[in-house]
Image (cartoon, rainbow, N blue to C red):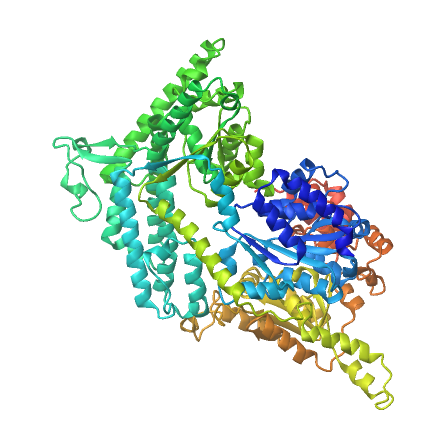
Amino acid sequence: MFEETNASNLKEESNSFRKWLPFEKDIFEELYDEDALLVMGKGLGLSRILTCFIRMHCSREHFVICLNMNDHAVNMHQILISRGVTLEALPKVIDAKTSVHDRTQLYKLGGCYLITSRILVVDFLLNRLDSKRITGLLVHDAHRVTETSIEAFAVRLYREQNRFGFVKAFSDDAVTLSCGFNRMEQALRNLYLRQAVLYPRFHVSIHRCFQAKQPTVYEIAVDKTPPMKAIQDAILIAIEATLKEIQRSTRYLGDMDLSMDAVMEKSFLSFIRRQLDPNWHKLSAKTKQLVSDLGTLRQLLGYLMSYDAISFYDFLLNHETVSGQQRVPSPWLFTEAADMLYTSAKERVFQVMEKNTGKSIHVRGRGAVKSSQLRSIEQVELRLTLECNPKWEALAQTLDEIEMEREKEAKSTFWGEGCVLVMVKDDRTCAQLLKFLSLGGKEMMKQQFGQYAMRKEAFIRRKLGKRSKEMSLGLEQQLLIQHARKFAEAQKAHSNTVIAMQQDCKSDSNMATRLVSKWTLKWDQQRQERVKRFKSSSFSTISSDDISDAAFQLNQPDKEVLIYSYDQVLQNGQDALCFLNRMLPRAVILYDPNMTFIRELEMFHASQDVNMEVYFMLYHQSVEEKMYLQEISQEKSAFERLIHQKAHLVIPSATMDVPFDVKMRSQHHANAYSMDTRTGGRANQRLKKLSYQVIVDIREFRSALPSMLHKKALKVVPITLEVGDYILSPAICVERKSVSDLFGSLNSGRLYNQVEQMMKHYKIPVVLIEFSEKKAFALQDPSEITNTISASNIISKLVLLLIHFPTLRLLWSRSPHTTVDLFKVIKKNLQEPDVKVAAAIGSGIDPEHSAKFTESSTLEAMEREQMGYAHAETFYNVSSVEILQKLPGITQYNYRHVLSRVKTLAELSNYSIQQCIQLVGQIQGTKLYEFFNRSF
């Protein structure tokens, strides 16, 4: 039936492939024929394949659910509109902003829906959505599907009632799927699939397609400056020494590869943490600091290539200051490599020189000259080096070459229309290049250093105050203060000059053009004003406002040179291929390497009738180059492992079977109504004693426990609970805490209030402390446990909590699987909890009216809205409600009344004292008004 319905759609999609690449058509036809997990290399157009399936099911004849696609909705809608899909047929987006009533109405229409997994699970459990009506599921980011994930829960609920609908999963993260033991096989089991379709970059059809039409690529190998080489070597030496020290200090890493090649992998640090997490509490403070230092040193390698010399040196100084304040300072800071690093980093910015001899004075490391050996500051001077990033000059030369080529080919239609696209790694680099192209390298660095000196002077003044004189400062500090004063005076004089110039040049439209170098961008009037501002002011650390403003100013499609960051290209879920089709660049300069974008460039060039030039910039023999090549090699190795796993997959023939415990629960339901004359009513009496219902707070579906409860045949009933997270019986209420949440709740006092509420309404209050399987089953290092009570100790806080609430019970669980077993033991032979009563507790609602919380009809959903007793997950912002409850004058008895009368906290803050009193009463209203209006 499904194939007959979609025959016309398949033909229509096949015709649309005329503009697509041959391998994309092969993938679509292969995936259309059977349910499978598609794994593609990054940047090879996975979203285009997924969009094709969505377009095929946009009509109301189908009912298709798309998971993990809400972030890509904007881009998806643009693609579908460009391919002829009407606005009415576009996929509907369902998220936390969509009310229950609206969701129920949308489900009746059919079509395609982009829905969050948590909402889908809740609607399945509350029977708001009949899974038998669903044509199929499209699961994006399938590498995230694990046994405990919410996506696996949604697919299981779907397959429990619907064995005939399709499931198609998509992923472009082969590295994640290849990690661990049979990760791909487990993903297939959780998705109820038997087949995996693999398309790496080295696939024959993809390689043949790209090889047939390659863009013109110019590799620009940029040489590092001698100080940059010295810094890189020093960091690598420090990393190697840190790795050796970690190996000596712990035995929990086993035979893990700790070579320098492994360090270049992006996931290296996560591998180490994953290996050490089960025994993290047993590690010494020094070992923990060494692991943290690895992350810092890798970060420095990236900053060396992207930061300017001043920002990099400033970061090093700040890190040294912070490390000195820690209980265990970073060991690598006391090595010769650190001396080489700091010395070379400072030489890129400035040097302290002796006037008479012209020799550089070192104030760090071996051979350092003490300030006491020189009589006065008059014997030294501050000589500015202000080394520019070598890539800046390479970029300027490349733009020169492109401009010259454009002039030669001025008659060509292609060269007359296209733009030059410069791609960088982040918004900070985007703003940095904007300043460089408008001010020039030396002028930019002078302004940066002036701001740096002024910040240092301000810091020194705050630190010393009025008690010390400048003569007690070091040579370097005194020289920086002198330079800061000179810069401030020059800045003031320059500002006055620019104001006069601006008054004289109002009629000169070419003034801004003369302020930039010969390869000036073709600015519009708004851009010219920005360049004037650049010339008339100095810059320090780039703020987030500056970054976004710079990025916005550059993103003008009609300009000759555009600078974008990769994050900007991929914002709102759009892919790089759509961006390139919109921009149609004639040349692309890859200032920073990015494997995904480079492949998107290959796809764009192969699908367009253009001759595009690509300029690929890399530091020669640098860590940047090694990391890029390592990323390509890592994905290739991942696909080779997946190919091997696919050849040896062990998937049961009955793929559609739901878990055994779920089937047993269904059989219990069937047997309860069967006629067995031999046993009489004894069987039914035994079944009535079975207790398998658990009431779960709607916000708990962010965790793995509700999914595990359902998988082990316990009936999960999701509602909004004001008291507790899980209700096991009329007498037992459970508040679940992860380890991190436990620390936070004890520190803020929130757990005390939660236990107090449970004590008030339930006979047996329980706090469940749930650990992670991948981490240590301990709250702290045993050596930190003392015989005395400490206000900062987690065990002491728990002991005080138990002393204050003697009837409180603690449950310690190793994992969600263990928690399920504990719940089953506790619930044995107990009475089932009442949903109406549980929903009413703590809400101030009569239990008879609380039934409206669990009903799903449209009429009752509308009544809930009128009553003001709506689901928190549907109508209220949980974070805002928690803030409201902490305000003076707001209590557990009146906050729901406030929610029904006030829309936002901003509106409440503007209430007059009469309105506050009318809202919550005389005393509470006065407290509330004074909180918002009393001065500091």
Identify the residue at horizontal 32%, vertical 32% (top origin). 388
Towards the viewer: 418 or 910: 418
Quarter holding the N terminus? bottom right
What percent of the width, then of the height, locates residue 901? Answer: 77, 47
What percent of the width, then of the height, locates residue 597? Answer: 49, 41
Would you identify the image quadrant in which residue 55 lies?
A: top right
What percent of the width, then of the height, locates residue 157? Answer: 71, 64
User: Which residue is most to the left?
Assistant: 357
- Relative height, residue 235 to residue 676 (above, below): above
What percent of the width, then of the height, locates residue 552? Answer: 54, 31
Towards the viewer: 50 or 314: 50
Going by the image, does 228 lie left or right of 369?
Answer: right
Quarter holding the C terminus? top right
Going by the image, does 902 lie left or right of 42?
Answer: right
Identify the residue at horizontal 75%, vertical 38% (top origin). 86
Going by the image, does 144 lie left or right of 623?
Answer: right
Q: Is residue 134 at least partly visible in the picture? A: yes
